[in-house]
């Protein structure tokens, strides 16, 4: 366990990639705010696991699509730990549909959570993050692959990448880096649910490494950007996908 006094908020951290990121940052010495939208039991289990391993974490409920809820989460982190140094914009949904068959509700939910949710976190972080902080957004390698049925999801992630590039320039002189990690096919419930095994096997072979990514693979990329070795990386999108694109 490394020692650091830095505080990280990880959104959508109760399971999947978010949980792996929270666990890895805690192991690297960060105090972790484990954000969740609705599943308090999973968030509390993760916090307990982190603390059992010698780390420090607290759960924090907030719907990232609600700007006021995001502000309250930052308030709580500041009250508990004195401030925030790192945010990981991981919360997101992925429901697939062709453009012709996409209903308004599906479109609106992706915009609200994936795009506006990331924006709400970025806006708050831009005003509150301590000097020397790190902002790491989660994009996706579907931006570049452009597969059928991923249009709405890919559009939200393309927006996240655009905000990444712009905010890295807006935070000039504050020693805060802004980057994105864009996973490829990764073995999480978000990715696997609803897909036949034949489709999963096909997607696993897209990478020259011929396997799905694991949540820990993505957490390692995030940890690099959040840690001291990532200090000179800014305004970039790191495609953590095993060579898919």
Image (cartoon, rainbow, N blue to C red):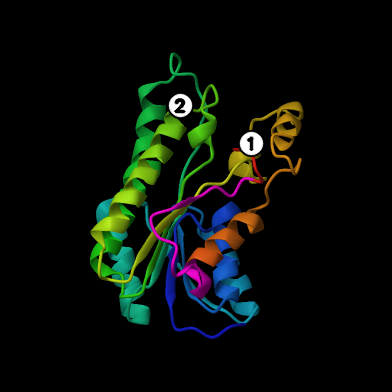
Q: Quadrant of residue 104?
A: top left
Quick one: SS at disc 1? loop
Question: Relative to 239, does residue 27 appear above or below in the rendering?
Answer: below
Farthest residue, direction bottom: 3
Tell me which segment is drawn in magenta: 226-241
For the point 61% across and 62% down, the residue is 220
Q: Residues within 10 Å of mark 2 (few under 14, many from 20)?
A: some
Q: Any magenta on residue 153?
A: no
**Percent from the top left, x then y, of residue 32?**
48, 71
Q: Nearer the viewer, mark 2 or mark 1?
A: 2
In three-dimensional space, the C-alpha distance between marks 2 and 1, rounded to whole angstroms, equals 18 Å
Q: Any magenta on residue 236?
A: yes
**Percent from the top left, x then y, of residue 182?**
52, 47
**Percent from the top left, x then y, of residue 215?**
64, 54
Any part of residue 69 in sight: no
- Give the label on residue 193, or none: 1
Question: Image quadrant for the N terminus?
Answer: bottom right
Any part of residue 236 in sight: yes
Question: Relative to 114, does residue 219 appear above or below in the rendering?
Answer: below
For the point 70% across and 39% down, the residue is 207
**Residue where numbered disc 2 is placed:** 151
């Amino acid at each position: 366990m490394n020692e650091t006094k830095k505080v990280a908020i990880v959104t959508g951290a109760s399971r999947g990639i978010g949980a792996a990121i929270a666990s890895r940052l805690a192991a690297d010495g960060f105090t972790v705010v484990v954000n969740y939208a609705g599943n308090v039991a999973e968030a509390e289990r993760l916090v307990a696991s982190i603390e059992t391993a010698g780390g420090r974490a607290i759960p924090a409920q907030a719907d990232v699509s609600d700007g006021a809820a995001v502000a309250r989460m930052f308030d709580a982190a500041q009250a508990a730990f004195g401030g925030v140094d790192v945010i990981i914009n991981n919360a997101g949904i992925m429901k697939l549909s062709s453009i012709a068959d996409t209903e308004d509700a599906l479109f609106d939910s992706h915009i609200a959570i994936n795009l506006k949710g990331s924006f709400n976190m970025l806006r708050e972080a831009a005003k509150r993050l301590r000097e020397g902080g790190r902002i790491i957004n989660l994009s996706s390698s579907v931006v570049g692959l452009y597969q059928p049925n991923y249009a709405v999801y890919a559009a939200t992630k393309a927006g996240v990448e655009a905000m990444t590039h712009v905010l890295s320039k807006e935070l000039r002189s504050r020693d805060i880096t802004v980057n994105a990690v864009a996973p490829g096919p990764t073995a999480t419930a978000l990715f696997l649910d609803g897909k036949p095994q034949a489709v999963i096997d096909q997607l696993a072979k897209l990478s020259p490494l011929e396997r799905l990514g694991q949540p820990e693979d993505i957490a390692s990329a995030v940890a690099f950007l959040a840690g001291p070795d990532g200090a000179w990386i800014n305004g970039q999108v790191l495609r953590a996908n095993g060579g898919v694109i």
